[in-house]
């Protein structure tokens, strides 16, 4: 073959090889893009037994081949519900994929402490069952205390004071607001009805500051004192100036 023909042929073959490599590379990238998965990862370290909230998470796309077994993946916003309000069994480092084995559902078995806000305390009080049945986790309540006081005149008189305002309810009995299907909720109600068959009170778990916890404990242990809770409208967190209620003021 003549040299004049050989050179263009070599160049043509080289160009064809380069073109094939480029096309193959683009094809691989396209296939890789098609095989990407979106996983949920934490934006900061999540501590052991910490409650996982939606704003702790972000979506990250990675090749499907690198998705860990049983990792939480995302397709629609409804997928956040599968992990939101779960409890971390172990510490989950920032940016790591979250395995289903690393979390457990919010429940009494997981403990109340995971729901207590930082610098607050979990305080459990008992209230009449019919009152507890009307209150739900995350409701806001005020706490009233009625007791016998010695007035300036020296006479004894019943008074009522608003001791605490806008207190967050963490849980009612074993309901910590974990979110349940109808069947599980019905089973839980049946269990609690059986447990309450021998008592007329239910438990409210409250989030209190250390100072408020002290005052509520003091009020509970005053001879003859009665504690009542009243529900607030959702979103009402205003602290009102409340005077002490007495019968003298009632009939003035």
Image: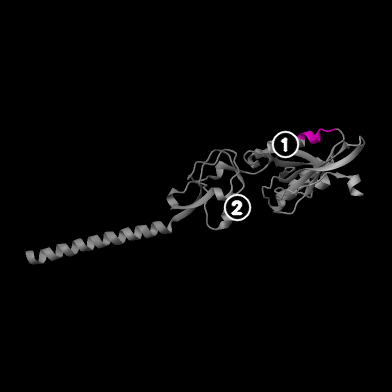
Residue at 78% in and 33% down: 218
Where residue 73 sits: x, y (%)? 52, 52
Q: Nearer the viewer, residue 147 or 9?
A: 147
Where residue 114 sits: x, y (%)? 63, 40
Check if residue 115 falls in the magenta segment.
Answer: no
Left or right: where does residue 56 sit relative to residue 191?
Answer: left
Q: Nearer the viewer, residue 240 or 116?
A: 240
User: Residue furthest toward the front?
Assistant: 153
What's drawn in magenta, residue-wise?
Answer: 217-222
Tag 2 residue: 81
SS at mark 2 in the image: helix
Left or right: where does residue 244 sit relative to residue 98?
Answer: right
Q: Nearer the viewer, residue 46 or 141?
A: 141
Residues under labels 2 and 1: Cα distance? 33 Å
**Residue 1: in sight, yes or no?**
no
Residue at 16% in and 63% down: 11
Left or right: where does residue 226 sit relative to residue 216?
Answer: right
Q: Looking at the picture, does residue 48 appear above or below residue 19? A: above
Which image quadrant: the N terminus? bottom left
For marks 2 and 1 on the same chain, the one whose residue lies earlier in the sequence = 2
Predominant SS of the magenta segment: helix
Left or right: where does residue 103 sit relative to residue 187?
Answer: left
- Which of the 4 image quarters holds residue 49? top right
Residue 213 circle label:
1
SS at mark 1 in the image: helix
- Which of the 4 image quarters holds residue 87? top right
Give the number of the mark in front: 2 or 1. Answer: 1
Residue at 11% in and 63% down: 7
Where residue 188 sits: x, y (%)? 74, 46
Where residue 236 sits: x, y (%)? 71, 53
């Amino acid at each position: 073959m003549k040299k004049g023909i050989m050179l263009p042929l070599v160049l043509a073959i080289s160009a064809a090889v380069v073109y094939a490599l480029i096309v193959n590379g683009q094809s691989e990238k396209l296939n890789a893009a098609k095989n990407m998965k979106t996983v949920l990862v934490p934006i900061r370290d999540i501590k052991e037994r910490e409650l996982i909230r939606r704003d702790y998470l972000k979506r990250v796309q990675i090749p499907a081949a690198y998705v860990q077994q049983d990792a939480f993946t995302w397709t629609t916003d409804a997928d956040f519900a599968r992990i939101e309000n779960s409890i971390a069994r172990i510490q989950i480092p920032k940016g790591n994929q979250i395995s289903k084995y690393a979390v457990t559902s919010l429940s009494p078995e997981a403990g109340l402490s995971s729901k207590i806000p930082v610098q607050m305390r979990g305080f459990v009080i008992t209230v009449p069952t019919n009152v507890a049945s009307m209150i739900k986790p995350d409701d806001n309540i005020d706490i009233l205390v009625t007791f016998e006081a010695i007035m300036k005149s020296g006479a004894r008189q019943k008074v009522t004071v608003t001791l605490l305002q806008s207190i967050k309810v963490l849980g009612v009995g074993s309901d910590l607001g974990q979110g349940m299907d109808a069947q599980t909720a019905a089973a839980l109600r049946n269990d609690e009805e059986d447990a309450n068959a021998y008592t007329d009170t239910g438990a409210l778990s409250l989030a209190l500051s250390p100072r408020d916890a002290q005052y509520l404990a003091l009020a509970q242990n005053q001879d003859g004192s009665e504690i009542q809770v009243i529900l607030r409208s959702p979103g009402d967190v205003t602290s009102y100036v409340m005077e002490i209620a007495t019968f003298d003021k009632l009939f003035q």
